[in-house]
Amino acid sequence: MKKLPILTKTITVDVYLFVGAKQHFEVPLDYVISESTPEQAYKKLLKEFPDQNVSAIENPYELPYEDFWGIDFNELGTEFIVDYPNKITEEVIRFNYDTSNNKN
């Protein structure tokens, strides 16, 4: 008796993660941080010491592995995409809820 193939479908879920990284800057002892926001101070460090680090804002994929200190779950996407065999059709399931209260 010939076995029938098992039919399956694929469900794609977006998973959002929080990734933490640290960068170190070697600066003179008299270096002063006088900017009013972290982003301004960070951009100034990058500008004044460009050979020490890549910009995590502009080039996050170029950060060296040793700069990463952790990864944590943030939230799930609010759409699940269901693909059927042979790409005959695609279904999108949308969840309408506030994800801000559902974090771990």
Image (tube, rainbow, N blue to C red):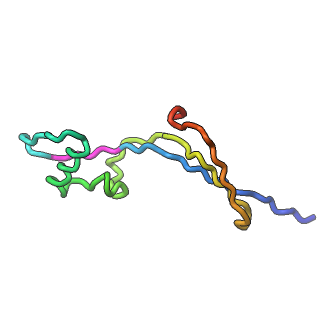
Say whether residue 24 is magenta: yes
Q: Residue at x 54, y 38 (%)?
A: 99
Q: Position of residue 51 (x, y in %)?
A: 18, 57
Residue at the front extreme? 96
Closest to the observer, 33 or 65: 33
> Magenta: predominant secondary structure element?
loop
Q: Relative to residue 60, is residue 51 drawn left or right?
A: left
Q: Does residue 100 lie above or below 83 as drawn?
A: above
Specify the quadrant of the image occupied by residue 58: bottom left
Closest to the observer, 100 or 42: 100
Residue at the left extreme? 30
Q: Relative to residue 76, is residue 34 drawn left or right?
A: left
Q: Residue at x 25, y 41 (%)?
A: 38
User: Which range of residues does the magenta coloring cover?
Assistant: 21-26
Say whether residue 50 is magenta: no
Q: Position of residue 98 (x, y in %)?
A: 55, 37
Figure quadrant of the N terminus: bottom right
Residue at the right extreme? 1
Q: Report the number of discs.
A: 0
Q: Does residue 74 lie above or below 92 as drawn?
A: above
Q: Position of residue 77 (x, y in %)?
A: 56, 46
Q: Residue at x 50, y 35 (%)?
A: 100
Q: Position of residue 89 (x, y in %)?
A: 72, 63
Q: Residue at x 18, y 56 (%)?
A: 50
Q: Relative to residue 44, is residue 99 drawn left or right?
A: right
